[in-house]
Image (tube, grey):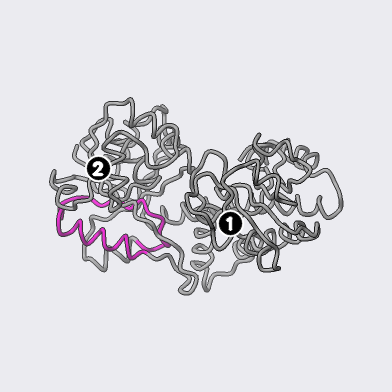
Amino acid sequence: MNITVVGMGYVGLSNAILLAQNNQVKALEVVEEKVNLINNKKSPIVDKEIENYLSNKDLDLEATSSKEIAYSHNPEYVIVAAPTNYDDQNNYFDTSLVELVIEDIMKFAPEAVVIVKSTVPVGYTASIRKKYKTDKILFSPEFLREGNALYDNLYPSRIIIGEKSDRASKFADLLAEGALKDDIEILLMNSTEAEAVKLFANTYLALRVAYFNELDTYAEVHNLDSKSIIDGVSLDPRIGNHYNNPSFGYGGYCLPKDTKQLLANYDQVPNNIIGAIVEANRTRKDFVADQILSKNPKRVGIYRLVMKAGSDNFRQSSIQGIMKRIKAKGIEVVVYEPVLEENDFYNSKVIKEIDEFKDICDVIVANRITDDIKDVKNKVYTRDLYNDN
């Protein structure tokens, strides 16, 4: 089957590779460097499975920056994986890039079924169908982790398509065909409900992060062994021993913006919990920053900006919020981040050598501990109790 995927971030690239095992896939990406890497069987992002599949699997995949080429094979499905950043002033996802892509599809491939994988507000698909006077737009939420994007598509927790129809079922089967997991749960529902699933799922994950962070805050204030408490709580099978490692707050590309969008969708709807989840993230960062400042450091080192181990992405990573709060108090902050080529990051010096970084810092702030800094543990401030993400 002929398929076009627009946008080669985590979502787009993992879907393109998954589908290119059994279909002819053209990948449209505006960044020429990404196009060249993909066509040379190299991954533009850090993801073990993506790197392996591009290098070693027989994929019918061609990346291009040309719209004419991307749609030249008359695709039956076009997957839209354009970014939708949250606009704090408008309290709404900025869906302008998604709409530009939809307009291109209507021009170059008007018969194609459009599968929106970008995260959007609840009710967006229904409104965009009305705006463009078409019934060919469906929403399908994506449930993947950065750094494990293709793995989560090969072994999906579920496949959800926002329409109860043959074409929706057919697309779900294409995704399942490329997966390695057997007996995948497939749910067909209306697009508005599918949009709600995405936002409520991510907000629940944010809730869990916020809960264990507040437990950890309590333990730290009262000088208690946080790990002992979490171990005891998590052994209840209804709670579970997972996603319970304290941090500096939930971060990354999805959770901060998705929680804010869901809260915005609650306008005129009674709520307490959803608003508290958003506020709890700010409170946690304030507390962590205060704990670091209480050590009266002259120079604070930020060890890694990335959201988590095994990732090269530091968009909205929680440690940046800590960094800004410390700098606001006039404390010098330096950064160690190997994926940064620049010499400074938001007016903070980037230290290239790990030994120099460890030597010049009074306090080293690390959301997650690695072997690099275990030898200076006396300098490190972290809430990483389990040495995992």
Along the line of sight, the residue nearer the viewer: 25 or 174:
25
Residue holding disc 2? 63
Q: Above or below — where is 350 with respect to 133?
A: above
**What residue appears at the point 29 percent right and 63 percent down from the top-left corner?**
99
Give me the disc on residue 341. none
In the picture as drawn, the residue positioned furthest to the right comes out as 223
Q: Which residues are magenta?
A: 95-124
Is 112 positioned to the left or the right of 221 in the image?
left
**What residue appears at the point 41 percent right and 52 percent down from the top-left corner?**
194
Q: Give the position of the C terminus as an image quadrant.
A: top right
> Where residue 385 sits in the image (x, y, percent)?
72, 40
**What residue appears at the point 32 percent right and 40 percent down from the top-left corner?**
172
Residue holding disc 1? 349
Along the line of sight, the residue nearer the viewer: 156 or 36:
36
Which quadrant holds residue 295?
A: bottom right
Q: Secondary structure at mark 1?
A: strand
Q: Magenta includes 117?
A: yes
Q: Secondary structure at mark 2?
A: strand
Q: CA distance from mark 1 to mark 2?
A: 36 Å
Q: Above or below — where is 55 with respect to 34?
A: above
Which amino acid type is marked by label 1? Lys
Which amino acid type is marked by label 2? Ala
Is 241 positioned to the left or the right of 220 in the image?
left
> Where residue 47 sits in the image (x, y, percent)?
44, 37
On the question of residue 75 being in view, the answer is yes
> Where residue 342 sits in the image (x, y, percent)?
48, 53
Q: Above or below — where is 221 with respect to 263?
A: above
Along the line of sight, the residue nearer the viewer: 238 or 261:
261
